[in-house]
Amino acid sequence: MATKLASDSQPIADINVTPFVDIILVVLIIFMVTTPIIMNPSMKINLPKAASGDDTVPSQLNVSIQKNGELYLNGQPSTLLSLSDYVKANIAQKPDLQAIIAADADVPHGKVIEVIDAVKTNGVTKFAISIEKK
């Protein structure tokens, strides 16, 4: 049986949403703080800087070239041969596959051209080169 108040015979039926809002705000703050940590790649690449450039769409073919010339495919160490094999395997399933190439500013131009050539000769027609805006 509901308890009766002295001045009112109706039980309290309102839901107090203040604790719920407090919890949601704390969760939102946690996500805001941890998202930049999660979204930053584990590899630090010093991207070249340019004043112009557009945002790129997410891709299933992300190629990174470290300063020392090491090649990474979707965050995993790779070689030009395994990159070519990956492109061949995925281009049949997704013909509009786009490659996003992120190379350190100190990587020789020839190394970047080798990666672009490996991607394009295996069927990828669209690629983007990652930059950092000035």
Image (cartoon, rainbow, N blue to C red):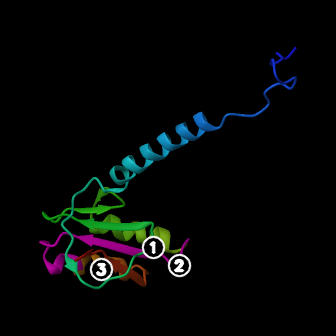
Residue at x 36% of width, y 73% of height: 100
What are the residue bounds of the magenta stretch? 93-112
Within-10-Å neighbours for mark 3: few <14, some 14–19, many 20+: some
Question: Vertically, is 47 above or below 117?
Answer: above
Q: Nearer the viewer, mark 3 or mark 1?
A: 1
| CA separation in Å, label 3 and label 1 | 18 Å
Question: Vertically, is 89 above or below 1?
Answer: below
The residue to which callout 2 is attached is 95
Quadrant in the rendering for residue 118: bottom left
**Residue 24 point in image, percent of width and height:** 55, 42
Q: Amino acid at mark 3?
A: Ile
Q: Quadrant of the N terminus?
A: top right
Q: Which label number is shown at residue 35? A: none
Camera-side residue: 124 or 85?
Answer: 124
Quadrant in the rendering for residue 121: bottom left
Q: Are marks 1 and 2 in contact (CB under 8 Å)?
A: no
Q: Amino acid at mark 1?
A: Val
Magenta residue check for 59:
no
The residue to which callout 1 is attached is 57
Residue at x 35% of width, y 79% of height: 128
Magenta residue check for 109:
yes
Within-10-Å neighbours for mark 1: few <14, some 14–19, many 20+: few
**Residue 83 point in image, percent of width and height:** 34, 67
